[in-house]
Amino acid sequence: MTKPETNLFTPHRLQGMELRNRLIRSATLEGMCGRDGLPTAALVDLYRRLAAGGCGLLISGITYVSEEGRLIPTGLGAACDAQLAGLKALAAAIHEEGGRFCLQLGHTGGQGRSTVCGQQPVAPSAVKLEQYPEMPREMTLAEIATSVAAFAAAAGRAKRAGCDAVQLHAAHGYLINQFLSPLTNQRQDGYGGDLAGRSRFLLETVAAVRQAVGVDFPLLVKLNGSDNLTGGLEIDESLAVAKLLDAAGIAGIEISSGTPASGDRVPIRLGHEKGDEMAYNVVLSRLIKQHVTCPVIAVGGIRSLHVATGLLRTNQADYLSLSRPLIREPDLPNKLQSGASDKSTCISCNGCLKTMLKGDLRCVVPHTS
Ligand SMILES: Cc1cc2nc3c(=O)[nH]c(=O)nc-3n(C[C@H](O)[C@H](O)[C@H](O)COP(=O)(O)O)c2cc1C
């Protein structure tokens, strides 16, 4: 059994936030909330178990900042003060187990469905693409300003509820990613065109969130290193965006890739459980890490202690983020630290995605004793 490298499990500060290790539960939509956006008791319990299982930082599933940004009917909400109580319950459960809680804030934009978001989905441009279930409507300048303000207000609620950090979901083809990508952003005004125009929505959101939570509250961003789509956001532009975010003083950047239309290079890839295919976004994140000063979080296909410690040792990442392995084994970090296990038994089959849509997030693969 491989002996854990000390720096994976050594307590560490991410901006002001003390973390007991460098393992992060990556944002994972659970579908375990009521239609009112409040968590069920089962979701509070799941977060308690994840925190007790040893991950240093737990990032929530995408949490909608406004009604028209809802992804599924049973997602977590931070769109109004009535949803504060739910965020407080989640934060308290995680803190009781010694964990830290980051709320992921998102807006589906053109990837929304009118039956869920209550209106024709809005997007930077009115273009029908494979990644959009419906034809979206182009956002007006007033709607852009309202959305920026909604992100900031939701971040303020996260702080008031006792969350330790927020993460902007700027990846996977959702609204912020749609503004960044030349494929989905065909605007002719100051929010489109060159990269300066396409990154304006993200940078204004970062500034507005900062204003709402103050400079000491950790603000993370999850960014696509590439959309893995012809005509989409590519690594050269993602790198430039990462540098802008770094200059804006964000606490850390998580590098993912893909949208639902990216074929076999979607964000949640199938069957990458073996050897070199592990850590499938690291080719992107290690490049970005070479050019930014803020911590870089690697995500996607990280399954073994060997790979995790190797990424830290070779300075390819500062933190390791895992989603599906922690659906299967919420206590995997503890097992890795104690030496009871040296890798996840997740086979990246994506059976969990179907259970999430039914509000019963779990691994469908039987455990062998
Ligand atoms: C059920 C499920 C729900 C997810 N929900 C989100 C989400 O809300 N926000 C997000 O940024 N990523 C989400 N992801 C993607 C993960 O955060 C992660 O980027 C991806 O699964 C790759 O990591 P893994 O190989 O460790 O699973 C989800 C993944 C799964 C399996």
Image: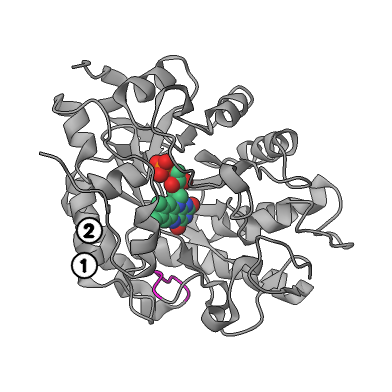
Q: Nearer the viewer, residue 136 or 364?
A: 364
In-image side of 181 versus 215 (left or right)? right
Asked which secondary structure carries label 2, the reply is helix
Q: Please report the residue visible at 29 percent of the width from the left and 50 percent of the height from the top.
A: 327
Q: Nearer the viewer, residue 115 or 182?
A: 115
Asked whether the viewer can see residue 28, the reply is: no
Residue 46: which numbered mark, if any? 2
Q: How many marks?
A: 2
Q: Residues within 10 Å of mark 2 (few under 14, many from 20)?
A: many
Asked whether the viewer can see residue 38, the reply is: yes
Of the 4 image quadrants, the one containing the C terminus is top left
Q: Nearer the viewer, residue 130 or 359?
A: 130
In-image side of 359 versus 251 (left or right)? left
Q: Please report the residue visible at 27 percent of the width from the left and 62 percent of the height from the top.
A: 90
Residue stretch rendered in magenta on the structure: 74-79
Q: Please report the residue visible at 31 percent of the width from the left and 40 percent of the height from the top.
A: 346
Mark 1–mark 2 Cα distance, whole angstroms, equals 6 Å
Which three-letter amino acid code belongs to the residue tagged 2? Answer: Leu
Q: Which residue is mark 1?
A: 42
Q: x%, y% of residue 264?
A: 57, 43
Residue 238: which numbered mark, if any? none
Q: Nearer the viewer, residue 161 or 286?
A: 286
| Residue 76 colored in magenta in the image | yes
Which three-letter amino acid code belongs to the residue tagged 1? Answer: Ala
Q: x%, y% of residue 168?
A: 53, 54
